[in-house]
Image (cartoon, rainbow, N blue to C red):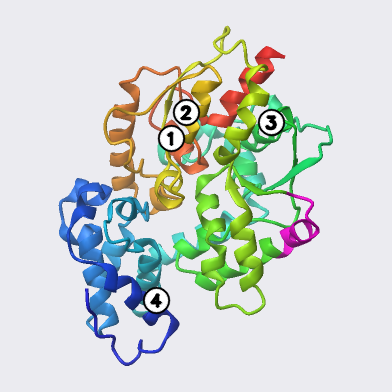
Amino acid sequence: MQTNLSPEFKGTRDGEAAEAILRKCVHCGFCTATCPTYQLLGDELDGPRGRIYLMKQVLEGGEVTRSTQLHLDRCLTCRNCETTCPSGVDYGHLVDIGRKIVEERVQRPAGEKAVRWLLKEGLTSPLFAPAMKMGQLVRPLLPAALKHKVPAPAAPRAGVWPQRQHARKVLMLAGCVQPAMMPNVNSATARVLDAAGIQTLVAAKAGCCGALRTHLNDHEGGLDDMRRNIDAWWPYVESGEVEAIVMNASGCGVAVKEYGHALAHDPDYAAKAARIGALTRDLSELLPDMVPALQSQVRHVGGAGHARRLAFHPPCTLQHGQQLRGGVETHLRALGFEVSLAGSESHLCCGSAGTYSVLQPTLAYQLRDRKLGHLSALEPQAIVSANIGCIQHLQSGTGTPVRHWVEVLDDALAAAA
């Protein structure tokens, strides 16, 4: 696809990057078949191809309207279209550029601006944890819309962190909301790694991966979050103390793996960011090495009160953003679990997509219910996933337990101990 950049974008970093991406697009339309919002709405402008044309018009100096903004807002950034695209169009980075430009030119209603500000400042604030505890205390009294965002209080084991020392060490990003919303995911990760002979370290000053602010169009704030994490992790990396930086939230994983791209033009951080991205691993990428060490320790999978029959929902950030498919279910099966994917649409987004379920609730809940319909047909004892947003979003629509897969593995290790 050829484009003629308007003078204001010629020679700019965003303009040149967008133009390079647009050149790859051949307008084939394969992406529309796997776009969740196009499947729901049937509007060309609510599919990747239509959004690409909207962004092309913006870059060529065309009119930018509130309608343009709405169509870009409705994109989940699930990147399913990237998996489908035969031309390798880097849609995720293109839509970030497009949204940034449109945000600068189209005034949002005051209510929308307030909600977006609260999300980016509130979810990354030290006050989020006490606010979540308060919400959990009064959870039965909350209206449904709020109750859906407040998980039940964590199990007692959430505070149990392994104390053994190991020669093998990894860093883990605790995350911005996960320690308050689902603390057991982090401690379960540390316990499972400990069982495999790997020690988990957490850098105290690391925080949000940067994705939250970036996807809310606060690009500078997102870059600052990335730089802070690099500064927190660099002493461990530079000394060679850790072999990897582990992510147990796939949304954070795809963001951190792309630090090198995000900070490529920062002379102070470009090399460090590339190194951090290269060291980053989703937790599932460690499983092949861990399975032999864990197999003898999970003989009693399926014991009383223990979920063995699982339905796995692979998050978009895992299967499309990181291009990791098949690893979790394959290795959990090797450890004695019965793991199935939905018979239909296992590649489609569940509707969580970071803050999307707050900003676009109607579409988000339609996608959630569609996903749960396919998963519940498997009659699982539990649904497992690999991202906190997916887990909480799916749990809001079903009585079947929805958990991180590492929590289920941790339970099996505890039952066998």
Which of pointers 1 and 3 lies earlier in the amino acid sequence? 3
Q: Is residue 348 above or below residue 276?
A: above
Q: Secondary structure at mark 1?
A: loop
Q: Is residue 106 visible?
A: no
Q: Residue furthest bottom?
A: 7
Q: Secondary structure at mark 2?
A: helix
* Disc 4 versus disc 2: nearer the observer: 2
User: Which residue was labeled with disc 2?
Assistant: 330
User: Which residue was labeled with disc 4?
Assistant: 17
Which quarter of the figure has residue 228? bottom right
Which of pointers 3 and 4 lies earlier in the amino acid sequence? 4
Residue type, mark 2 in image? Thr
Q: Residue at x 43, y 52 (%)?
A: 321
The quarter of the picture where the N terminus appears is bottom left
User: Which residue was labeled with disc 1?
Assistant: 326
Circles 2 and 1, Cβ within 8 Å, touching? The answer is yes
Q: Which residues are magenta?
A: 231-242
Instruction: Identify which residue, 109 or 173, lies in the foreground.
Output: 173
Horizontal side of 15 relative to 211 (left or right) equals left
Q: Is residue 115 above or below residue 173?
A: below
Q: Position of residue 19 (x, y in %)?
A: 32, 78
Which of pointers 4 and 2 lies earlier in the amino acid sequence? 4
Binning the other alpha carbons within 10 Å of mark 4 as few (below 14), some (14 to 19) or many (20 upward) gives some
